[in-house]
């Protein structure tokens, strides 16, 4: 078992009378790809915001390595080595791809030349090298997703939180992104591997990439395990498909 890089312990968050996250505990091992899945409105993005400092838990605590994150602002957490992407990609439209990536690189590289050099290396890693001089506004959806990934990776994280980085992509674009994400975890000779914690609805990605999967429904953790275990878990099937469909599937299975 590898060391635990991120640990959430009994974390809860409410908005008025809505309990968005309820008593959730999970752990992300160093060197892993861990997936967080669940129906729309399950609380996944809220949980990401809680562990990355954009929201503060009402209860529970979050550890990044040995550091308690309570009260730390997102930029301080980023300096510790945790960076996240966002569902809605918002690049600096009137800047080039290279300049956008360099914004992330400036977290650890004060000099512009050093930041641009880092940005070029990251662009190569995510497949954006041929588009460095393009304006970000000219990129396709797939290109903007890669740019969002590159900006986060340029901060040199130990842990990268990916919030539906495959959303909006067609099947071919998804297939092309899977090895990119896997290579980020594995690392290269010039860049160390990065632990990945990802929210994802594209089950192809979860089944092919994830070492461990957590499932949220109505703010609660309802299952965890390997992708194969999760795919056959009745509680997970019901959460995604509804009680009636789950019962019909079980009945069909008994008749075969």
Image (spheres, helix red, strand yellow):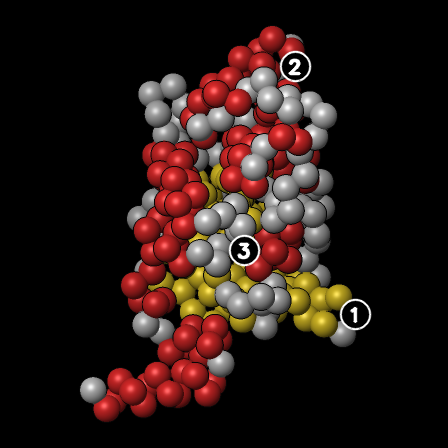
Q: Is residue 115 left or right of residue 174?
A: right
Q: Which mark is residue 110?
A: 2
**In this picture, residue 44 sits left or right of residue 180:** right
Tag 3: Cα neighbours inside 10 Å, few (<14), some, or many (≥20)?
many
Would you place residue 171 above or below residue 83 in this image? Answer: below
> Which is closer to the viewer, label 3 or label 1?
1
Residue identifier under label 1: 16
Q: Looking at the picture, does residue 94 appear above or below residue 29?
A: above
Badge 3 element: strand
Q: Is residue 152 depicted above or below 223 in this figure? A: above
**CA distance separating discs 3 and 2:** 32 Å
Q: Is residue 117 left or right of residue 19?
A: left
Residue located beneath label 3 in the image = 8
Q: Is residue 207 found left or right of 138 in the rendered image?
A: left
Residue for point 48% across, 20% down: 130
Q: Splitting the image into 4 quarters, where does residue 204 fall? A: bottom left
Instruction: Name the residue: 33% across, 85% down.
Output: 250
Viewer-nearest residue: 169 or 250: 169
Of residues 41 and 73, the one drawn nearer to the viewer in this rendering: 41
Query: Residue 115 at what x, y percent from top left?
Result: 59, 15
Instruction: Single out the mark in the foreground, 3 or 2.
Output: 2
Dot 1 falls on a residue whose secondary structure is loop
Q: Which of the two residues, 61 or 210, is positioned nearer the viewer here?
A: 210
Q: Which quarter of the rendering shows the C terminus?
A: bottom left
Return the x and y of residue 15 as percentages of the image width and height. 75, 66
* Residue at 38% across, 19% down: 190
Q: Nearer the viewer, residue 248 or 103?
A: 248
Tell which circle, 3 or 1, labels the residue nearer the N-terminal end: 3
Quarter of the image for residue 203 reads bottom left
Helix, strand or loop status at disc 2: loop
Cβ atoms at labels 1 and 2 below 8 Å apart? no
Going from N to C along the chain, the mark reached first, 3 or 2, is 3
């Amino acid at each position: 078992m590898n060391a635990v890089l991120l640990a959430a312990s009994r974390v809860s968050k409410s908005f008025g009378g809505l309990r968005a996250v309820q008593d959730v505990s999970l752990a992300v091992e160093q060197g892993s790809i861990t997936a967080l899945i669940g129906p729309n409105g399950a609380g996944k993005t809220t949980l990401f915001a809680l562990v990355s400092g954009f929201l503060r838990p009402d209860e529970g605590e979050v550890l990044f390595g040995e550091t308690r994150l309570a009260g730390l602002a997102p930029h301080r957490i980023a300096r510790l080595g945790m960076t996240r992407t966002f569902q809605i990609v918002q690049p600096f439209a009137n800047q080039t791809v290279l300049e956008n990536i360099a914004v992330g690189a400036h977290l650890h590289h004060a000099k512009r030349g050093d930041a641009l050099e880092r940005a070029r290396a990251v662009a190569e890693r995510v497949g954006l090298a041929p588009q460095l001089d393009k304006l970000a506004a000219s990129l396709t959806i797939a290109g903007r997703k890669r740019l969002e990934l590159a900006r986060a990776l340029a901060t040199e994280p130990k842990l990268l939180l990916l919030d539906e980085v495959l959303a909006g992509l067609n099947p071919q674009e998804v297939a092309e992104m899977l090895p990119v994400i896997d290579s980020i975890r594995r690392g290269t000779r010039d860049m160390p591997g990065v632990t990945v914690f990802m929210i994802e609805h594209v089950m192809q990605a979860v089944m092919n990439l994830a070492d461990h999967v957590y499932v949220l429904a109505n703010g609660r953790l309802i299952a965890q395990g390997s992708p194969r275990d999760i795919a056959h878990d009745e509680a997970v099937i019901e959460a995604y498909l509804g009680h009636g469909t789950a019962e019909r599937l079980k009945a069909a299975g008994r008749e075969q």
